[in-house]
Image (cartoon, rainbow, N blue to C red):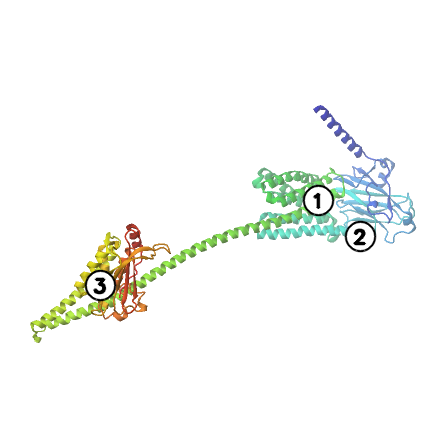
Amino acid sequence: MFGLRCAAIRAALGLAWLLLACLALPSHAQPGPLRLDAGLSMFERNLDGRSQAYYDATGQLTREQVASSPYQERFETLPGALNGGYARGAWWVRFQVQASPAEVERPLESGWWLRLNAPYVDYLDVWWPDAGAGASGGFAHRALGGMRASAQREMPWSISAVRLPALPDAEPRWVWVRLAGDRTLSLAGGVSPLRELATVQQRLNYADAAVVGMALLMAVVSLMMGIALPDRRFIAYAGYLVTLGLLFGSSEGMPAFLWLQNSPVAAVRLHNFSVCLHTAAAFGFARVLLDMERQFPRMNRVFQVMTLVCLAACAVAIAGGYGHVARPLNLAWVVFAACVVPMCVMALRRNIQAWPGLIGYAIYFLMGSVHFAKNLQWLPYTQLTQYSYVFGSILHIMAFFFALDWRVRHRERRALSLSLRHRARLARRVNERTRDLRQEIAEHHRTHDQLALALREQRGLLAMVSHEFRTPLGTIGGSAQILSDDRLGLAREEVKKEAEKISRTVFRMRDLVDTLLADEWLDASSNNLSLAPIELAVFLREKIEEHNEGVAGGRISLRLDARELPVLADETLMHIAMDNLLTNAIKYAPAHSPVRVRAGIRRCRSDDFPEGDAIPGVCIQVCDEGPGFMPQDLTHVFERFYRAAGVRRIPGIGLGLHMVHRIATVHGGSVVASNGPGEGAVLTLTLPLLGSAEPPETRRAIAMSMADPGGGR
């Protein structure tokens, strides 16, 4: 079975080869003439299938020689246009023209023109029947081609055109064309009226201008983008497009009929130079586009050498030796395309985002290879093979324009993404810095408040010292002076009276010093409490009895709302707190006015517990009938050394209520100052009930972290 399949495949291939061989066999059949008939379309008046060609290898034959019988039989009918490639000799093409009966009867006013499209032919010679000659009459000659000045033509256009004479009859007449030169030899065309010929030339001019303008415009855009981004690929592409525009313009003869009408040699060498220069630019741009130095290092060295070779060919072309480098240059293009297209595919697999440029570049080189394969006679001359390079260039310019837009958008998206990340990072840093600054500001505010409090305490201490120490010292000094004055002759009773005054003053100063020392001791001992269970009911009875036997004189009464008031407290500190509360009430209340103490258990709010919760606590209220507190003093009564303005005549240093507040705080309780319903002050001390508050370790931690608020009346 496998052998049968192989035999069938061989037979099919052999049949295909036979058909191709038959098609390729030269035909000596007489082709039909070109009819000078305005009723036919332009395509029906083309040379395709109506011309015969003969290759003169020596390039020395004349028209009369090739028209003789030995050479007549060597002409072969062309199925299409002539594609002579690069030839050392010359190509002869002949065809017949025949006027239609309508043309013979009424010739066109503008006449018929022979349209010869041979853009790369250096020497183009045309012989046509002379006016008034018969079918076998003489011939007129016109020398055209790239190496002939366009100013001497009948129409100085890029299309070579010859006006045919009006034919007197409908007999066919031969037209002979000779092509020679260093560049590729090709010939297409036909016969056209003048208006049709002008339309063809106009369309060709529009197409050339559009392609050249597109290439140059894209070169400017790429150069600007390459400088702005910056990206060397765009700069390399700009240089490549400039050479492409120069190649297109010179290929269609634009410099020859625009600027160099009388310098045909310069125009031809400019075209040859542009071919070499564009080839060098193509090799160089491929290296940059495909990043060969990194992705294809071996091919990069090959392309470097080819770029230098093509630059050397530029010098050869300028010197007039293009014929020696034309074939290798076209072959290099085909090999170049065969290498670049696979590399584009490989690069596309590595970087899918580069697909517009790589696909456009691959299409461009495929179409270019078709054009140069035509120049090498590997493919026939057709409109597709002749203008494939133009079509490929337009497609690849559009693809690269799309790639440029794609790349710019990709950079914009990447820049936007990077900007968003930077903005988020910046916002995060700003928020962090703002938070740090707020913390620093809050810390500065706390420091400022503490400093302001310390300054107020300092001023209060100075005022207290100046008042409380000055007066006793003045008393002591006056009494001592009286006692030391012998002239007074004081009696014993008077001496005793002054001595008692000194003793009371000393006791007063000692109490002041003891209070100051007690405050300092409280600061030191608040971090090291000796907590123990205390029954406040018993403690209060003993403390009130102690004061009633002393300065209170029985004015203090006690009311207990519960039989047991257990708390966990430092007994020494509790003595200090109750002594200050009771002494404060006795000091500021009128003489002989009662002082009421009430103690009980109630549920109290605490800042140490969540809002809405309450804990059971022991509340001790001390009420007197003194002047009470002024509204502006209620927020300051617990500050250190603070004394209300109305009571500064009463001895005191402003530490009593401050010490009570400190003691309540370190025990997890509180103290509140208010005014009674009538007259007098009400001080409420609240302590957690035993077993309901935090453990001692927690309260110690709370006490250590509490701020020192200060104060007293």
Q: CA distance from mark 1 to mark 2?
A: 24 Å
Q: Residues within 10 Å of mark 1 (few under 14, many from 20)?
A: many
> Circle 1 sits on which residue?
389
Q: Is residue 171 left or right of residue 474?
A: right
The image's mark for residue 198 is: 2
Amino acid type, label 1: Tyr
Q: Position of residue 198 (x, y in %)?
A: 80, 52
Count the labels in the image: 3
The quarter of the picture where the C terminus appears is: bottom left
At 58% from the left edge and 52% from the top edge, which residue is drawn?
227
Q: Earlier in the sequence, mark 2 or mark 3?
A: 2
> Circle 3 sits on which residue?
557
Q: Residues within 10 Å of mark 3 (few under 14, many from 20)?
A: some
The image's mark for residue 541 is: none
Q: CA distance from mark 2 to mark 3?
A: 133 Å
**Quadrant hosting residue 451:** bottom left
Of circles 2 and 3, the one toward us is 3
- SS assignment at label 3: strand
Q: Position of residue 695 (x, y in %)?
A: 29, 50
Of circles 3 and 1, the one toward us is 3
Amino acid type, label 2: Ala
* Picture layout, residue 684 above or below residue 169: below
* Picture layout, residue 27 above or below residue 658: above
Q: Position of residue 225 (x, y in %)?
A: 60, 52
Q: Earlier in the sequence, mark 1 or mark 2?
A: 2
Q: Earlier in the sequence, mark 3 or mark 1?
A: 1
- SS assignment at label 2: helix
Q: Nearer the viewer, residue 112 or 370?
A: 370
At 65% from the left edge and 47% from the top edge, which residue is drawn?
399
- SS assignment at label 1: helix
The answer to whether any part of residue 245 appears in the image is: yes
